[in-house]
Amino acid sequence: KPTARSWWKESVVYQIYPRSFMDSNGDGIGDLQGIISKLDYLKELGVDVIWLSPVYKSPNDDNGYDISDYRDIMDDFGTMSDWDQLLGEVHQRGMKLIMDLVVNHSSDEHPWFLESRSSKDSEYRDYYIWRPGQEGREPNNWTSFFRGPAWEYDEATDEYYLHLFTRKQPDLNWENPKVREEVYEMMTWWLDKGIDGFRMDVINLISKVDGLPSAGGERYAWGGEYFMNGPRIHEYLREMNEQVLSRYDIMTVGEMPGVSPEEAVQYANAEGTELNMVFQFEHMELDNGRGGKWDPGQVNLRELKRSISNWQTGLEGKAWNSLYLNNHDQPRMVSRFGDDRKYRVESAKMLATFLHTLQGTPYIYQGEEIGMTNMPFATIEDCRDIESHNVYREHVEGGGSADEIMNAIRAKGRDNARTPMQWNADENAGFTTGEPWLLVNPNYKEINAEAAVSDPNSVYHYYRKLIALRKAHPVIVYGSYELLAEEDENVFAYVRTLGEDKLLVMLNFSNDTQSFASPYPLLASGHGDLLIANYAVGEGGATSGLEADIQLRPYEARVYLLQ
Ligand code: TEU
Ligand code: CA
């Protein structure tokens, strides 16, 4: 049956990482007034929805993903009245605003946790997950996402609390109905302020397996099977949906490490009983070497095709995909999947074409639209991310080489995405008049928004065009997906179909010219319109470039509408 139309399927989302977007007062930290000053830029780009990474009160152990007050704004970013102004100005420009919801854990400085840790008898004790030690050790052997044990001993009550992330991010106990009520009330409070939805941080981790069993064997081991997509997860999400989400016309996206297409069909089911879509991670793991994330390898295009195709066809008609190639936790897309030197512009446009022509809702991460690149961090002292620091320390203390781990951090570290947005060629890229909290990428004189806006051939204008095309051609949003030339190691090509309309997308993922066999059998009437391309194609004219044997130049992208 045909996919139902919804505004959030037709939208393009732009993610803002507030700390790094725009500083309005010279303290070196991005803030809400900074964002407000750039709303016209976003409106010009054509995005529909802005997703704000957390702006709540936080001691910033993990840059705002550790929240100490869910109903207040971080001092660094401004005040609630700045936030009210932001929402008003976003809406005034016909855009929407979604907020980050971080409720797998809170900060250890949240009043709930302060109460909880104070005594075993506290009425807040069960807001978190406390257990006695096992023979002087942690209650089980789980490691946290950021290295080291997932448990912290607390002297006051001689017990341990669970933290799947840093020790300043204790996990909330969703088994406790009071916790769920508190969360739903808080969500309702924000929705009543007029926001347009939530991005839900690691929301598939909120249900843990009863008894919190140890993971196989070793002293500290990955216990994902006991907390990812846990036993009560769908119950909780359906409850949240019934009590909160279903009462508003909003969009929701759940960030879900370790989710499969089969599970996503349930989480993002078309009946709308849980969430609208999920952020999956499969394509973010393809360049993991044998040693995992910190053993960087190469992305194999055939594996990428297999993975993406699996998600495209697996969700077709049953659920809805989110589409992203980078965010605040991932390296820059052009450095990872493209070429951030010679073919930076071509490959950034090719990847943008990919992002916008699959079935799903595209998410653009700040700076992606101007082709920002990874950062050449010289030493660990230049990094701010707690994950990179932990990984570095563990590696070096374990006798590993500092050079080796710095190479991995340069390839995979989260700070790559967090360097300040490059606005212009002035000092600090126009991000701040002060000292930026994280170094500005030295390539800002060449790569910046001002230069991109004034160059009609820039990555920025290519994004504008792609966003506009999605609005003009429903086949780009709703068309079904069919992979072509599955075995080709360099070209990713597919057809999207909606009624009579067919969209042909050809993407060269390599830095060589590749010949691509004729897509002509697809052409019922033998012609197609070139909708967008990142190189000049043929002489212009309708069928131009669709010859029997197409030569795709390095990172070339072409999209035809076939009729
Ligand atoms: O991320 C959770 C997550 O699974 C990752 O993207 C994580 O950063 C990566 O696996 C580390 O190797 C979310 C947020 O996006 C991230 O910024 C937070 O640090 C994390 O949750 C905890 O709230
Ligand atoms: Ca500031």
Image (cartoon, helix red, strand yellow):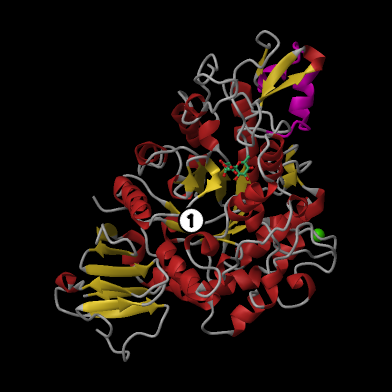
Report which residue position mark 1 lands on.
324
Measured from the top left, where is residue 240 in percent x and y? 52, 33
Measured from the top left, where is residue 526 in percent x and y? 16, 79
Give whichever of 348, 470 is nearer the camera: 348
Measured from the top left, where is residue 388 in percent x and y? 67, 45
474 with respect to 331 (left or right): left
- Outermost residue toward the bottom in this view: 539
Verify whether residue 113 appears in magenta: yes
Q: Is residue 540 above or below residue 82?
A: below
Please identify the quarter of the rendering in which residue 401 is found.
Answer: top right
Q: Is residue 562 visible?
A: yes
Quarter containing ligand 2? bottom right
Q: Is residue 324 above or below residue 103?
A: below
Give whichever of 530, 268 is nearer the camera: 530
522 with respect to 504 (left or right): left
Q: Is residue 515 above or below residue 6?
A: below
Q: How many marks?
A: 1
Q: In this view, does 449 lie above or below 183?
A: below
Measured from the top left, where is residue 263 in percent x and y? 38, 36
178 with respect to 552 (left or right): right
Q: Residue at x 24, y 61 (%)?
A: 485
Please tell me how crowded label 1 is: few (under 14), some (14-19), or many (20+) other residues with Cα within 10 Å: many
Give whichever of 295, 485 is nearer the camera: 295
Span of residues in magenta: 106-128
**The C terminus, quarter of image:** bottom left
Q: Which residue is drawn at 35% across and 44% down?
A: 270
Please identify the quarter of the rendering in which residue 8 is found.
Answer: bottom left
SS state under label 1: loop
228 with respect to 545 (left or right): right
Tell me the amino acid under the disc marked 1: Tyr
